[in-house]
Amino acid sequence: MSPRQEMIARELAEYERSSNDATYAIDLRGEQKYLPVIRVNPADLLLNPKNNRLSGQLKDHPKCNNIEADPVSKESQDLLHDLLAKTAKFTDLMSQLDYLGQKEPGLITSDGLLVNGNTRVAALRELKKSYVEVAVLPPNINETDVLSMEMSLQLTDLVHQNYPFTNELLLMKRYLDSDNSKEELAKVKGWARQGVKKVDEHMRLLAYIEEVRALSPVPYSVFDSKKQHLKDLDSDYMKLKGNGDIDAAESLKWARLKMTFLGLNKDQVRSIDENFVENRLLTRLNDEESKELRHYIEGYKPETSNDGLDDLFGEQKTQSIDMKKALKDFLNNASNRDTEGNVAKDLTGIYGPLAFTARRATEAIIDEQKLVNANAAPGETLKEARVKIQALRHNLPSIMRDPSFKKDKFIYNIEELVNELEELQQVLNSKDDE
């Protein structure tokens, strides 16, 4: 028996001798069990290397193999502590524990391995607290039991930290890979209505992430802020796939993923359809200034096959731009990634103009959609245009100081805008004369 096991055994024996009746209720193998709650030094416990709150971070860490080989070593435990200390709201958790104290016990095995409460223990260590309250599981616990408990505790967890989006997906995948059914997962998640459908959706979201990671080792954490991007993509992808148009579905997927990594927001990305690159992006690149950007995009046109089928059927196949390859090249370009592998915020080279043009194209689509929806209230369309022009007027002095500002082109667009407003006024006047 290790010193840690002996310490826990002593505390459990003292629990039995004392009048302490503190217990922690947990569902174990379909039965409710009441576990004894003891106090131990936070430094004496083992942080869990399979802590699902850190799934993505651990998979992406360059020393992940060291942790798997020797999870109880000082190096591995220190690394786990550092990763936990970098999780969202860790500082807030420390403040809350320091001010209010621990409201709920952690959960450990009889060996001192934390099943639940890893982040709290790390926070209590940072606060130099002398004890943490933990409930102790029976000695016959196995890994399947631990996983089931973590799935259940994820729903009722009171440690004030939600699972990051990608870690939640990885936890669900691990649960299914442990021979649990979709129905069981839906039940654990509390999805009473269309539970299996929701499980399938979440696994598709993870599949999109893994497809991107197959192109380049993008950290899972990059996708934590892209949940809505992926959900919108999945909805439209499945509609196209359901209609039997797999090619269109794939074109939509990679166009949206590429634009997501170029920094477009969820509303802009949502406006992109399967023909966006050919019908919306390239059509904006017909002048001499856009020659380089057009050449870049057209460089991803697939080579035309000469298999004779087009002649046989009397039609020509439209070859869409290969945005999957474009995304792969973008992600594998070192200048687009920081030292931790995340996509850089400031895009260099051709990617800055590409992102700018894509934003303009998507905003035009959004404006068109608003116009269609605003037939009963055309004044709102003019109001939005006026607000944008007012913002431009306020920012114009600083814009004009930029060496790339082209005054002649700007004046030309002002004249075109004035002409459109005059024609709009004429249409309005003609209706008044009828």
Image: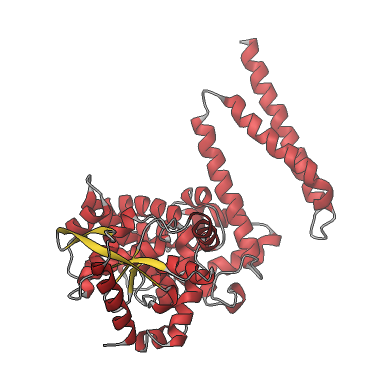
Q: Residue at x 59, y 53 (%)?
A: 359
| In this rendering, position of residue 382 left or right of residue 304 | right
Q: Residue at x 52, y 73 (%)?
A: 331
As displayed, is residue 404 above or below residue 433? Answer: below
For residue 22, which quarter of the picture? bottom left
For residue 119, which quarter of the picture? bottom left
As displayed, is residue 32 above or below residue 112? Answer: above
Indicate the colouring scheme: secondary structure
| In this rendering, position of residue 139 left or right of residue 360 | left
Q: Along the line of sight, which residue is nearer the eye, 26 or 376?
A: 26
Q: x%, y% of residue 90?
A: 51, 63
Total number of numbered labels?
0
| In this rendering, position of residue 16 left or right of residue 386 | left
Outermost residue on the front side: it is: 18
Work out whether residue 318 can be spotted.
Answer: no
Q: Along the line of sight, which residue is nearer the eye, 295 or 9?
A: 9
Q: Along the line of sight, which residue is nearer the eye, 63 or 345?
A: 63
Work out whether residue 338 can be spotted.
Answer: yes
Quarter in which the N terminus is drawn: bottom left
Q: x%, y% of residue 208?
A: 37, 64
Q: x%, y% of residue 231?
A: 39, 53
Q: x%, y% of residue 425?
A: 69, 23
Outermost residue on the left side: it is: 30
As displayed, is residue 336 above or below residue 105? Answer: below
Quarter in which the C terminus is drawn: top right
Q: Along the line of sight, which residue is nearer the eye, 276 or 34?
A: 34
